[in-house]
Image: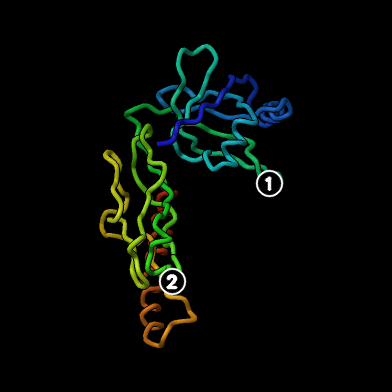
Amino acid sequence: MADADVFYCEPRKRTGTGGARAVRRDGWIPGVLYGGGEKPTPVRLKHNEITKAYLSGRLRPQLAMIDVPGQDKHQPVIPRDFQIHPVKGTPIHVDFMRVDDNTRIDVEIPVRFVGEEESPGLKRGGVLNIVRHTIHVYAPATAIPEFFEFDISEIDIGDAVHISAVAIPDGVKLVTTDRDFTVATIAAPSAVRSAGEDEEDEAEAEAAEGEEAAAETEEGGAKAD
C-alpha cells in the first residue's frame, strides 16, 4: 500500500457560504472533519496539497492523515466527499471521515492489468474489453487496497478474466459474492472475424453487457445505501 498523504489543516470559525468564500479568498480550501465519535469540525486545508492530490488521482477513498495544530499525532482519515469548481475543475470543498483500526467502509477499488505484452490474444490483434474498472469491497479503513492487479499474460481471444483470478487481502470482503463475475474479456478484432466467430463474440458481448449492467446496478444500490 502506498504511503498515506498528510494534509495540513487549521480549524475555521466561520461556516456557511460566506465563511467558505472567505476561506477560498485567503487561498485555502474549506472542509469538514467528521466521524470517529466526535463532533464535525470545520477546517481549512492548504490549496496546493488538496489540488495536487486531486489531480494525481489520490483524493479518493484511501487512507490519509490530517495534521492538526496542537495534536501530538496525525489523525487517520478517509476522503469521503469533495466539490469541484465547475469551470476550473479543481476542488473547492473536501470532507474527511475520521477512522481507526476498527473502522470498515465500502469502497470501489480500481483494477489494473499486467502481462499485455505476453498475452496471446492481444498478440493476435485481440482487444482488451474491461467490464469492471473498479471492484466494490468492504475493507478496513486503515488497510484499503490501492488496486487489484490481474495477470492476462496467458489470456487468449475469447477468454475471460474473472474475480477469482486475483487474491483478496485478509480483512477485505467482496460485496458481490454470489458469482465469479467477469472483470475483462479479450475480443477478436472485427477485421479478422469469421461468421462463426461473430456469433460467438456476440454471445460474449451479451454476457459482458450483462456483467456491466449488474455492476451498474450494484453501484447504484451502494450509492443509494
Q: Looking at numbered disc 1 in the image, what kind of residue is underneath it?
A: Pro
Q: Nearer the viewer, residue 68 or 164?
A: 164
Residue 151 occupies quadrant: bottom left
Occupied quadrant, residue 200: bottom left
Amino acid at circle 2: Gly
Which image quarter is the N terminus in? top left
Residue 220, position as x, y percentages in the image: 44, 54
Q: Which residue is mark 2?
A: 126
Q: Are marks 1 and 2 in contact (CB under 8 Å)?
A: no
Local SS, label 2? loop
**Residue at point 58% right, 39% down?**
54
Which residue is at a point 40% across and 28% down the rendered structure image? 99
Point out the residue furthest to the right here.
Answer: 25
Q: Is residue 155 above or below residue 188?
A: above
Q: Is residue 125 above or below residue 162?
A: below
Q: Nearer the viewer, residue 110 or 189?
A: 189
* Disc 1/disc 2 C-alpha distance (Å): 39 Å
* Few, some or many residues within 10 Å of mark 2 (<14, 14–19, 20+): many
- First in sequence: mark 1 vs mark 2: 1
Q: x%, y% of residue 196?
A: 37, 86
Q: Is residue 132 left or right of residue 19?
A: left
**Observer-nearest of 155 and 27:** 155
Residue at which label 1 appears: 86
Closer to viewer: mark 1 or mark 2: 2
Within-10-Å neighbours for mark 1: few <14, some 14–19, many 20+ = few
Q: Position of residue 143 (x, y in %)?
A: 36, 35
Q: At 60% from the left edge and 42% from the top edge, which residue is drawn?
A: 55
